[in-house]
Amino acid sequence: MYRILFTKDALKTLRKLPRNLAKRIRKKIDRVAADPFAPYANVKKLRDRPGYRLRVGDWRVIYELEKNELIILVLKISSRGEIYK
């Protein structure tokens, strides 16, 4: 299982979200951390930069895999309209 690290911005956003939504997002991230290379329908590789996008309803989680250290680094959590700006 990969270890999950959050940037300050991602953690701050997660804490501001309603509890049920934050739990849902965290559960999806944990699922990806268990096997990041499994074919998930809501995960896509980003085109313009390194990393991946996890879709959780109208919210998006941008993360990178550090394979050498078995770490998932969550860079940003935001709504669908704001994430790519």
Image (cartoon, rainbow, N blue to C red):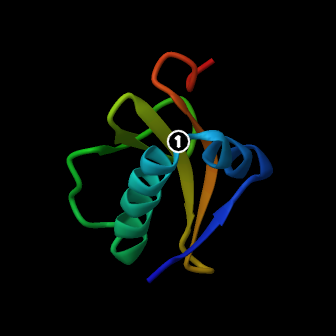
Quadrant of the rendered image containing residue 73: bottom right
The one nearer the camera, 32 or 20, is: 20
Secondary structure under badge 1?
loop
The quarter of the picture where the N terminus appears is bottom left
Q: Is residue 4 above or below residue 78?
A: below
Residue at 32%, 66% (x, y): give it: 37
Q: Which residue is mark 1?
A: 18
In the rendering, at what x and y percent does residue 11 appear?
69, 52
Side of 67 relative to 31 (left or right)? right
In the rendering, at what x and y percent does residue 39 appear?
21, 58
Residue at 56%, 55% (x, y): give it: 64
Residue placed farthest to the front in the image?
A: 19
Q: Tell me, yes or no, if residue 36 can be seen here.
A: no
Dot 1 surroundings within 10 Å: few (below 14), some, or many (20 or more)?
A: few
Q: Is residue 64 above or below residue 5?
A: above
Residue at 51%, 50% (x, y): give it: 19
In the rendering, at what x and y percent does residue 79 appear?
51, 26
- Tell me the kind of residue under disc 1: Pro
Q: Is residue 4 above or below residue 29?
A: below
